[in-house]
Image (cartoon, helix red, strand yellow):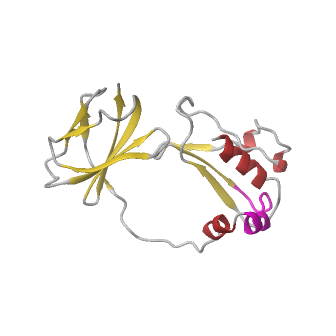
């Protein structure tokens, strides 16, 4: 996380002519819920508590973001130092009229668990669903296909909090569980 903030701070030490949005999708596990995170750089005299540069919290995907107006970051610096990142950041945007995913009511028990989780899917899900379990850093630690009532062995996972994402058809269900 320190590298990410250092990189962002270095990036913001220069100026350019395009608007940029910074989005943080993972924070350390001990970060308090709805914590205020600030962005500091030469644009605000390196003030780490500038209310004008506080990232906003999005509860739907648990991310923090801020949009900097034109003139507060370095397009030329990106192009020179991070050509892959530059091409990704400045790639033409595309929009889609695709329908957003439907919510899937899913549960896992027992929670907390030491060895295995039993998956409970709604009756509308016939057949298999794709399960992905991620650690608090957002890294996928287990991917498998499951059916309603099936157990998933989590005994090899270290103790901690995990996020499970189950998808079937166009529906997605997300749930947290604790591994002892």
The residue at the point 15 percent across, 45 percent down is: 148
Which residue range is magenta in the image? 68-81
- Residue farthest along the front direction in this orientation: 156
Q: Is residue 56 left or right of residue 167?
A: right
Q: Is residue 91 left or right of residue 125?
A: right
Q: How many marks?
A: 0
Please identify the quarter of the rendering in which residue 115 is found: top left
The residue at the point 69 percent across, 68 percent down is: 83
Magenta stretch contains residue 166? no
Rendered view: 160 above or below 6: above
117 or 124, which is in the foreground?
A: 117
Q: Is residue 70 left or right of residue 180?
A: right
User: Is the N terminus in the top left, top right, bottom left or bottom right quadrant?
Assistant: top right
Q: Position of residue 11 (x, y in %)?
A: 76, 55
Q: Position of residue 164 (x, y in %)?
A: 34, 42
Q: Is residue 107 left or right of residue 92?
A: left
Q: Position of residue 95 (x, y in %)?
A: 49, 71
88 or 66, which is in the foreground?
A: 88
82 or 19, which is in the foreground?
A: 82
User: Is the C terminus in the top left, top right, bottom left or bottom right quadrant?
Assistant: top left
Magenta stretch contains residue 73? yes
The residue at the point 83 percent across, 50 percent down is: 43
Rendered view: 80 above or below 101: below
The residue at the point 72 percent across, 44 percent down is: 39
């Amino acid at each position: 996380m320190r590298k990410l903030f250092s990189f962002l701070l270095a990036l913001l030490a220069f100026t350019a002519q395009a608007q940029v949005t910074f989005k943080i999708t993972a924070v350390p596990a001990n970060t308090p819920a709805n914590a205020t995170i600030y962005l500091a750089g030469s644009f605000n005299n390196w003030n780490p508590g500038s209310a004008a540069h506080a990232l906003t919290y999005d509860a739907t995907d648990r991310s923090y973001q801020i949009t900097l107006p034109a003139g507060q970051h370095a397009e030329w610096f990106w192009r020179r130092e991070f050509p892959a990142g530059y091409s990704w950041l400045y790639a033409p945007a595309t929009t889609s009229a695709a329908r957003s995913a439907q919510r899937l009511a899913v549960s896992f028990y027992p929670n907390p668990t030491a060895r295995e989780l039993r998956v409970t899917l709604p009756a509308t899900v016939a057949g298999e669903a794709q399960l992905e379990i991620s650690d608090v850093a957002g890294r996928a630690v287990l991917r498998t296909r499951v059916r309603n009532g099936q157990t998933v062995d989590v005994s090899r996972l270290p103790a901690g909090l995990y996020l499970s994402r189950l998808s079937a058809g166009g529906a997605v269900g997300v749930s947290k569980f604790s591994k002892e």
